């Protein structure tokens, strides 16, 4: 027995180096083959721990059914601000503190591009070169949002945007995310509105004086028949801090837009006239477009009269008839004028909209949409 055991032991020991060598070779072969295998795609969801909230949401919907509104709101979306709009920086932590919008992580750190649920691109900052747009491959289901508050006449090179963007965010009411210059809040119950004391007639503040423009030509004709105080760089000085108190003493304010485009109704109406307590005399898109935003008896449109002279006659009539003038304020018992102020406001509201889980889409032509429905010069 002892001799047989010794022979077997000797045989095993002699085979051990060969067995060890075979194990080493098999292990090396396994490591070599392993290097060619995409483990993430083979065994788990790609980068599962780094899923963007949008992708994570899709996973949860697939596994557990649709998310409730509460669950949607609890997901934190990463919103990448591609450029500071016009170079103006703003706080990135205000969505919940100021606007009550939760689940939003605003960032300007481009290193987070691959993890961002949405990239908001302020187009005026990048419109002169396609190279200013994100260059890295786009992650699956990432939203590109075209953000622009300027009119088509001031928006260049839109043809380079074909099939790049998923959502629009502009002042137009047919945008995916609507960001108007102002709006009317319906009051829960009627409230009295005190008309500011009026001692002057017509005012206009203008920063971009172009003698051949439609609005300047109309002003030149109107002032022949009614006195108008004009404020600007080469006219009466007016500091911003004094703007509302100065304009509030005027009965009328010329809210003349510099371009005529659908829904392009800017701070010239909302801030300069309405918040200052003056009756706006508007020049811009047609009256019916204004009436999409305002009661018809809250403003006077230059197209209401065949000539500037007849407009002046009507304004002088209102000046002499206080009861008739005050009819332009009756709507204020039912509405309050609101302005959308602050860049952070726009980005936070975009985040809130994305929480509604919109269907993913690609816009074939931003140019075709944004340049449509323009109006001829008046």
Image: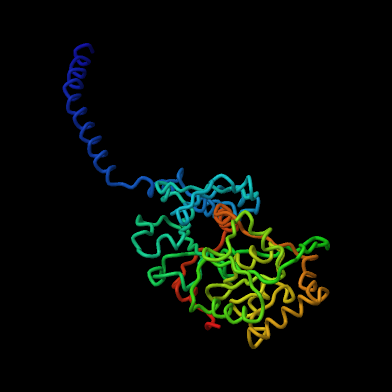
For the residue pair 358 and 242, the one nearer the viewer reads as 242
Residue 101 placement (x, y as % from top left): 62, 50
Residue 17 placement (x, y as % from top left): 17, 25
Residue 212 placement (x, y as % from top left): 48, 79
Residue 289 placement (x, y as % from top left): 63, 77
Task: Check the picture and name the quadrant holding the C terminus.
Answer: bottom right
For the residue pair 342 and 322, the one nearer the viewer reads as 322
* Residue occupying the point 39% across, 72% down: 159
Instruction: Please identify the quarter of the rendering in which residue 279 is found.
Output: bottom right
Q: Outermost residue toward the top?
A: 2
Task: Check the picture and name the quadrant holding the N terminus.
Answer: top left
* Residue occupying the point 71% across, 68% down: 200
Q: Would you say 23 lies left or right of 119 here? A: left
Name above or below for residue 24 compared with residue 214.
Answer: above
Name above or below for residue 189 compared with residue 37.
Answer: below
* Residue occupying the point 47% across, 73% down: 153
Q: Outermost residue toward the bottom?
A: 306
Name above or below for residue 113 compared with residue 214.
Answer: above
């Amino acid at each position: 027995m002892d001799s047989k055991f010794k022979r077997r032991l000797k045989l095993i020991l002699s085979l051990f180096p060969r067995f060890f060598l075979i194990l080493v070779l098999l292990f090396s072969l396994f490591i070599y083959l392993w290097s060619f295998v995409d483990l993430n795609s083979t065994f788990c969801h790609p980068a599962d721990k780094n899923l963007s909230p949008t992708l994570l949401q899709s996973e949860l919907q697939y596994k557990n059914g649709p998310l409730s509104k509460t669950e949607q709101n609890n997901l934190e979306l990463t919103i990448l601000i591609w450029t500071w709009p016009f170079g103006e920086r703003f706080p990135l932590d205000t969505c919940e503190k100021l606007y009550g919008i939760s689940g939003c992580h605003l960032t300007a750190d481009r290193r987070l591009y691959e993890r961002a649920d949405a990239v908001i691109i302020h187009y005026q900052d990048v419109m002169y070169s396609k190279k200013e747009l994100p260059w890295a491959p786009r992650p699956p289901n990432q939203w590109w949002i075209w953000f622009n508050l300027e009119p088509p006449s001031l928006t260049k090179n839109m043809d380079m945007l074909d099939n790049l963007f998923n959502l629009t965010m502009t002042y137009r009411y047919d945008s995916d995310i609507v960001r108007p210059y102002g709006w009317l809040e319906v009051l829960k119950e009627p409230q009295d509105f005190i008309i500011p004391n009026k001692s002057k007639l017509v005012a206009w503040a203008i920063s971009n004086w172009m003698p051949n423009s439609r609005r300047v030509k109309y002003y030149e004709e109107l002032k022949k028949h009614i006195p108008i105080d004009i404020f600007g760089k080469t006219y009466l000085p007016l500091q911003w801090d004094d703007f509302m108190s100065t304009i509030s003493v005027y009965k009328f304010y010329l809210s003349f837009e510099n371009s005529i485009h659908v829904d392009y109704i800017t701070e010239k109406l909302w801030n300069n006239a309405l918040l200052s307590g003056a009756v706006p005399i508007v020049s811009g898109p047609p009256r019916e477009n204004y009436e999409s935003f305002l009661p018809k008896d809250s403003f006077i449109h230059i197209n209401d009269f065949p000539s500037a002279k007849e407009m002046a006659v009507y304004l002088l009539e209102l000046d002499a008839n206080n009861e008739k003038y005050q009819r332009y304020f009756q709507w204020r018992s039912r509405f309050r004028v609101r302005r959308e102020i602050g860049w952070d406001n726009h980005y936070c509201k975009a985040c809130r909209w994305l929480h509604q889980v919109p269907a993913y889409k690609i816009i074939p032509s931003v140019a075709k949409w944004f340049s449509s429905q323009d109006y001829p010069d008046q």
